[in-house]
Amino acid sequence: MTRLIISCQHCAKQFPSPLQMDLDTFHALLGGNSVRCPYCEERTKCSKENMMLTCISKESA
Ligand SMILES: [Zn+2]
């Protein structure tokens, strides 16, 4: 299981992607989608610079 963490380009907070995402989707999104930051509600771009994939094998949110 992987979780996608996004760093907001506006407020710099990090939040898990609202999208359920696997690696294929992650790579597809690098084309230039955006998500809404839950903190400042600005849309922030999904790019390699501000996205991280975190593997979580044991924890569950
Ligand atoms: Zn933000």
Image (tube, rainbow, N blue to C red):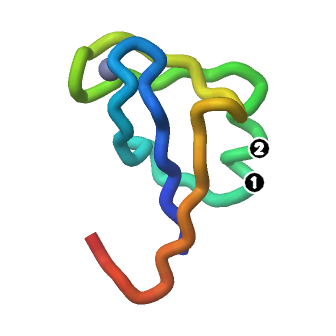
Q: Three-letter amino acid code at disc 2?
A: His
The answer for how far apart the CA atoms under marks 2 and 1 are is 5 Å
* Contact, mark 2 vs mark 1 (Cβ under 8 Å): yes
Mark 1 is surrounded, within 10 Å at the Cα level, by few (under 14), some (14 to 19) or many (20 or more) other residues, namely few
Identify the residue under disc 1.
24
Per the image, label 2 sits on a secondary structure element best described as: helix
The image quadrant that residue 30 belongs to is top right
Q: Position of residue 39 (x, y in %)?
A: 22, 25
Q: Does the residue labelled 2 lie within 8 Å of ligand 1?
A: no
Q: Position of residue 28 (x, y in %)?
A: 76, 38
Quarter of the image with the N terminus in it: bottom right
Residue drawn at x 48%, y 53% as measured from the top left: 20
Q: Residue 58 carries which label?
A: none
Q: Where is residue 33 in the image (x, y as percent from the top left)?
A: 62, 22
Q: Is residue 2 above or below residue 29?
A: below
Q: Position of residue 29 (x, y in %)?
A: 69, 34
Quarter of the image with the C terminus in it: bottom left
Residue drawn at x 46%, y 33% as measured from the top left: 7
Mark 2 is surrounded, within 10 Å at the Cα level, by few (under 14), some (14 to 19) or many (20 or more) other residues, namely few
Per the image, label 1 sits on a secondary structure element best described as: helix
Q: Three-letter amino acid code at disc 1?
A: Asp
The image quadrant that residue 45 belongs to is top right
Residue drawn at x 71%, y 34% as measured from the top left: 48
Q: Quadrant of ligand 1?
A: top left
Identify the residue under disc 2.
27
